[in-house]
Image (cartoon, rainbow, N blue to C red):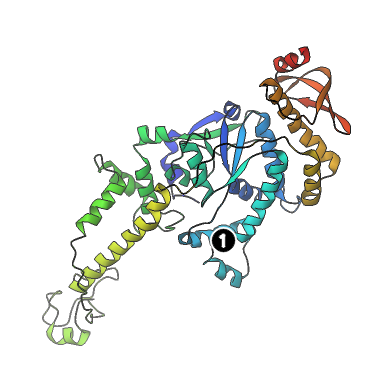
């Protein structure tokens, strides 16, 4: 997924930061990443109905209670150039199809089956009051666009393509299970200042090493060679150097060079019998000719022309698909993200139908989010219709080293006893009112 070897290249600027330090930030989440991760959790495989929904629900709950605001991004239509990568990704996500189906999938990027999963997730996010948007193309592109426009404070994704699309801050590899959860943070400013890798260079690295659009990259070019090339550019970027190579080849004659027979022994122009009788000029022999290695490149006019034509054609494809994909934004501006109150009744029905959760279990989990939302609205003076009201503070408590109160909240039709990790000062302010 993403650019080959990119994470190892930018490893020197990786920062491990506490997950709680993201409190107050708005982050764009590549939803497909979370869905794929849920498909491979051993503890849930074969035991949990709809693991992607369960994983999404509890991650949203945990991060929301940390004060992190999430905006989810759904995949749009993938470029046709990405068909090979999409086929492999579908097989990874869903365990593969029959041979006939797999053959069909190699030419399609419609993401039909995966879109059905995305729609389920979007429906649940609506019931939880969490905003989401649909990308014009790749989800990581939309995440990066929102970040570059200052609409969010960073992206949560494992796809390094986000840097090529212009992301400023990327978070990955966060762990929700430990007592002191950490998350890896990568900042584009450090990638540029310390590693001297600007956005154009990152796009160039994707072309040379391989990415979702050119899975194999340029044959024979590795990470070390690419980084050495960047060091020798002296102020130029990789894309500028590519343009320089292209300009130097624009004077090549468009005249078609006629292909002539080549000897199967020495791989030079002429037949093997002719070389046996009179020798080969390029082998400098008067009788017979010299065998050449398998990867030998004939220096004749036709081969020179063919190599040049293929190189120009390949570079034209790079400019048409790769550079335009990463450097030209396709997503539209988003004015605001509408956040709503969680809807208890709709979430109960959805969880029962999709995940087989008993209604009382869903109530217990959703009321925590509803309580948190209500307290934040009161704290910041936001006037929104309230579904619950505080009835009584039972006693002070400490949860996860955070001082809080145990409160009885009244909800339409029933009451529930909840413990909310909200500061004592906030609750005291509300109680005094």
Q: Which quadrant of the view contains residue 274?
A: bottom left
Q: Is residue 41 visible?
A: no
Task: Please report the residue visible at 56 percent of the width from the left and 57 percent of the height from the top.
Answer: 89
Q: Is residue 262 positioned above or below 136 on the image?
A: below
Q: Is residue 403 left or right of residue 302?
A: right
Task: Please report the residue visible at 26 percent of the width from the left and 67 percent of the height from the top.
Answer: 309
Task: Please report the residue visible at 27 percent of the width from the left and 70 percent of the height from the top.
Answer: 293
Q: Is residue 310 left or right of residue 21?
A: left
The one nearer the camera, 160 or 126, is 126
Q: Is residue 283 left or right of residue 354?
A: left
Q: Is residue 285 visible?
A: yes
The one nearer the camera, 15 or 70, is 70
The one nearer the camera, 245 or 426, is 426
Quarter of the image for the C terminus: give it: top right
In percent of width and height, residue 217 lies at 39, 56
The residue identified by callout 1 is 110
In percent of width and height, residue 254 lies at 21, 69
Q: Is residue 244 positioned above or below 308 on the image?
A: above
Q: Is residue 43 left or right of residue 96?
A: right
Q: Which quadrant of the view contains residue 109?
A: bottom right
């Amino acid at each position: 997924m993403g650019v080959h070897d990119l994470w190892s290249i930018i490893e020197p600027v990786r920062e491990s930061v506490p997950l709680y330090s993201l409190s107050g930030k708005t982050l764009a989440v590549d939803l497909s990443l979370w869905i794929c991760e849920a498909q491979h959790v051993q503890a849930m495989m074969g035991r949990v109905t709809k693991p992607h929904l369960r994983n999404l629900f509890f991650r949203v709950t945990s991060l929301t209670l940390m004060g992190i605001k999430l905006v989810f991004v759904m995949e749009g239509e993938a470029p046709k150039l990405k068909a090979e990568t999409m086929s492999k990704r579908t097989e990874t996500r869903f365990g593969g199809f029959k041979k006939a189906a797999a053959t069909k999938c190699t030419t399609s990027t419609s993401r039909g089956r995966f879109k059905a999963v995305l729609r389920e997730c979007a429906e649940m996010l609506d019931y939880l009051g969490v905003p989401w948007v649909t990308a014009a193309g790749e989800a990581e592109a939309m995440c990066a666009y929102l970040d570059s426009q200052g609409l969010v404070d960073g992206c949560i994704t494992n796809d390094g393509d986000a840097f090529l699309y212009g992301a400023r801050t990327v978070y990955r590899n966060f762990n929700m299970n430990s007592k002191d959860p950490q998350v890896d943070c990568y900042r584009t400013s450090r990638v540029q200042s310390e590693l001297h890798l600007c956005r154009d260079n990152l796009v160039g690295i994707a072309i040379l090493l391989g990415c979702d659009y050119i899975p194999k990259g340029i044959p024979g070019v590795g990470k070390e060679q690419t980084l050495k090339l960047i060091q020798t550019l002296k102020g130029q970027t990789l894309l500028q150097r590519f343009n320089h190579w292209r300009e130097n080849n624009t004077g090549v004659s468009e005249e078609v060079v006629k292909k002539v027979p080549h000897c199967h022994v020495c791989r030079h122009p002429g037949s093997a019998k002719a070389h046996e009788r009179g020798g080969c000029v390029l082998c400098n022999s008067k009788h017979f000719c010299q065998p050449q290695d398998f990867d030998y490149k004939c220096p004749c006019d036709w081969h020179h022309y063919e190599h040049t034509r293929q190189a120009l054609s390949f570079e034209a494809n790079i400019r048409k698909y790769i550079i335009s994909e990463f450097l030209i934004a396709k997503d539209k501006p988003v004015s605001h993200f509408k956040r709503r109150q969680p809807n208890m009744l709709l979430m109960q029905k959805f969880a029962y139908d999709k995940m087989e959760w008993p209604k009382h279990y869903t109530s217990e989990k959703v009321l925590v989010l509803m309580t948190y939302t209500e307290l934040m609205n009161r704290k910041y003076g936001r006037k929104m219709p309230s579904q619950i009201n505080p009835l009584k503070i039972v006693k002070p408590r400490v949860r996860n080293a955070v001082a809080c109160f145990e409160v009885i909240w009244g909800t339409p039709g029933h009451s529930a006893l909840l413990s909310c990790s909200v500061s004592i000062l906030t609750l005291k302010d509300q109680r005094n009112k």
